[in-house]
Image (spheres, rainbow, N blue to C red):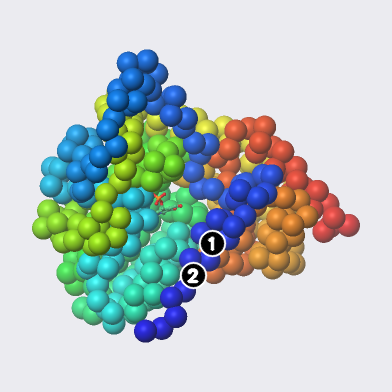
C-alpha cells in the first residue's frame, strides 16, 4: 500500500483558518446561526426536548423526503444522508471503484476526489476546464480520455474553484461520454443554489442517465457547514451498497443535525436560505470585483457564475504558495494558493464573509501588494 497523501488544501485551511484575523479561504458564505433556523419559541422548545438518541442511520425519513423532493423522480430510498458531502464522496468512491480502476476527473476541482483516487489506488486521468475559454470544459479532451476502461467520470458543477456552471449542452456531452462506455457519473453539486447571475438553480445530473450519483450538502448553498450534513442521491440498490460503508465509518449524522437539517430543507425555510446565500454572494462579489479592478491589470478573473469564491490570476512574479505564506504570516489573512489546484499564479479568494470583514481582509492584501510592488 502506498503512502496515504494528505488533503493539502483542507490541511492548510484547518491549520490556519482559526488563527488568522481574516479568513478569506472559505468557499461558502458567512454561516447561519441556530437562531435563524428557529425563529419561533415553540421551535426552540421542540429542539430542547430532543432526546439525543441515534437517529435513523441512513438519515431521518422526513429529511430524506425533503431531499428526495429536490430530485425529480427520486424517493427517500434513493437518498443516503452522510456526514457532509465529504463523507458522501469518500464512501461512494470506495463502494464503486476498486484499486487499479480508472477514473476521469474534471480539473481544477475541489481536490478531494483527485486525492482520494490516488489514495485508493485508482488510475487517475484529468480533463480540464480552460481558463482561456472562460473555464469551459475541454470536451474533446474528455472524449479522448474516456475509454471502455473508464469506470467513473467525476465532475464538480458548479465548479470549485472557478465558479463555472456547465451549459445544458456540456452536461449532455458529459453524460454521453459516460453512457458510451457505461461509466458511473459522480456529480458534486454542493454549489447548486449559490448562483451569482441567475435565480434559477443549477440543474442536477440526476435523472439524465441511470448511473448518476449526485452529491450535495448543507455547507455551501445553505450556509450550514457546522451541521456536517450531506447526502448522495443515486439508484436505490447502489445507495444501499454505499450505506454499507456508512455503517463502518460514521454510522449516522447526529440527532440535532438531523432535526435542523430537516427544518433547513423544508419547503418554507429552504428558499429563504438560498436567497440569503445569493445575497451574500452578490454583495460580496461586487466588493471583491471593485477591489480587483482598482488594481488595473495586476489581476485577471473570469467572473464566477456561482459559489463565494473567485479564482484570480495575478500578474507578478511570485509563487502562489509563497505569496499565501507571506499573507498568512505578515498580514494575518488566509486565501488559497493556486498551487493547491495545480495552477500557480492564481489565488482563490472568498467573498462570502460580511462586507466589513471582507473589505478589511482585502486591505491587508493591499498592504502586501504595495510592499511587493515598491
Ligand atoms: C466541491 C466540494 N465538495 C465537497 C465539499 C465538502 O463539503 P461538506 O462540508 O459538505 O463535507 C466541499 C467543501 O469545500 C466542496 O467544495
Residue 116 position, x and y percent, is 38, 69
Label of residue 6 in the image:
2
Res 111 visible: yes
The answer to whether mark 1 and mark 2 are in CB contact below 8 A is yes
56 or 308, which lies in front? Answer: 56
- The residue that appears at 42% across and 63% down in the rendered structure is 112
State how far apart marks 1 and 2 are (Cα): 7 Å
Q: Is residue 210 visible?
A: no
Task: Kindly identify the residue that appears in the image at 59 percent across and 67 percent down.
Answer: 339
What residue does disc 1 label?
11
Q: Position of residue 195 (x, y in %)?
A: 43, 39
Find residue 42 and report its image quarter.
Answer: top left
In the displayed structure image, the side of residue 307 where residue 269 appears, left or right: left
31 left or right of 176? right
Circle nearer the N terminus (1, 2):
2
Disc 2 residue crowd, few under 14, some 14–19, many 20+, Cα 10 Å:
few
Tell me if residue 354 comes above or below residue 121 in the rendering.
above
Left-right relation of 294 to 252? right
Q: Position of residue 97 (x, y in %)?
A: 24, 72
Residue 243, numbered label: none
* Among the 4 quarters of the image, the one containing residue 314: bottom right
From the viewer's perspective, is residue 69 above or below residue 327?
A: above
Q: In this view of the protein, which residue sits in the foreground, 157 or 231?
A: 231
- Judge left or right: residue 343 versus residue 69: right
Q: Residue furthest bottom?
A: 1
Neighbourhood count class around disc 1 (C-alpha, 10 Å): few under 14, some 14–19, many 20 upward: few
**Which secondary structure, mark 2?**
loop
Residue 121 in which image quadrant: bottom left
Looking at the image, residue 221 lies above or below residue 93: above
Task: Residue 315: give x, y in percent of width and height.
Answer: 71, 61
Amino acid at each position: 500500500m502506498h503512502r496515504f497523501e494528505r488533503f493539502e488544501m483542507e490541511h492548510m485551511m484547518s491549520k490556519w483558518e482559526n488563527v488568522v484575523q481574516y479568513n478569506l479561504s472559505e468557499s461558502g458564505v458567512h454561516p447561519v446561526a441556530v437562531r435563524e433556523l428557529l425563529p419561533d419559541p415553540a421551535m426552540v422548545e421542540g429542539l430542547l426536548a430532543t432526546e439525543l438518541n441515534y437517529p435513523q442511520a441512513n438519515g431521518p425519513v422526513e429529511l430524506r423526503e425533503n431531499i428526495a423532493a429536490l430530485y425529480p423522480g427520486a424517493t427517500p430510498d434513493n437518498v443516503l444522508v452522510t456526514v457532509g458531502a465529504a463523507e458522501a464522496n469518500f464512501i461512494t468512491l470506495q463502494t464503486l471503484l476498486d484499486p487499479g480502476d480508472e477514473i476521469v476527473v474534471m480539473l481544477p476541482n475541489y481536490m478531494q476526489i483527485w486525492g482520494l483516487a490516488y489514495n485508493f489506488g485508482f488510475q487517475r486521468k484529468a480533463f480540464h476546464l480552460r481558463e482561456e475559454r472562460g473555464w469551459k470544459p475541454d470536451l474533446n479532451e474528455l472524449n479522448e480520455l474516456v475509454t471502455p476502461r473508464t469506470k467513473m467520470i467525476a465532475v464538480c458543477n458548479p465548479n470549485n474553484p472557478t465558479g463555472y456552471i456547465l451549459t445544458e449542452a456540456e452536461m449532455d456531452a458529459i453524460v454521453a461520454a459516460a453512457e458510451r462506455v457505461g461509466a458511473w457519473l459522480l456529480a458534486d453539486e454542493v454549489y447548486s443554489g449559490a448562483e451569482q447571475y441567475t435565480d434559477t438553480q443549477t440543474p442536477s445530473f440526476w435523472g439524465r442517465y441511470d448511473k448518476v450519483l449526485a452529491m450535495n450538502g448543507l455547507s455551501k448553498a445553505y450556509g450550514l457547514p457546522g451541521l456536517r450534513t450531506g447526502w448522495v442521491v443515486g439508484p436505490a440498490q447502489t445507495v444501499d451498497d454505499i450505506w454499507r460503508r456508512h455503517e463502518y465509518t460514521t454510522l449516522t449524522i447526529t440527532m440535532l443535525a438531523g432535526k435542523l437539517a430537516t427544518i433547513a430543507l423544508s419547503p418554507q425555510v429552504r428558499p429563504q436560505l438560498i436567497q440569503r446565500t445569493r445575497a451574500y454572494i452578490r454583495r460580496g462579489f461586487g466588493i471583491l470585483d471593485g477591489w480587483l479592478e482598482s488594481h488595473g491589470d495586476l489581476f485577471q478573473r473570469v467572473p464566477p457564475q456561482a459559489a463565494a469564491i473567485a479564482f484570480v490570476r495575478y500578474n507578478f512574479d511570485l509563487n502562489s504558495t509563497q505569496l499565501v505564506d507571506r499573507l498568512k504570516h505578515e498580514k494575518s489573512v488566509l486565501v488559497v494558493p493556486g498551487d493547491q489546484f495545480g495552477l500557480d499564479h492564481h489565488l482563490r479568494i472568498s467573498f462570502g464573509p460580511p462586507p466589513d470583514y471582507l473589505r478589511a481582509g482585502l486591505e491587508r492584501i493591499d498592504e502586501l501588494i504595495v510592499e511587493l510592488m515598491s
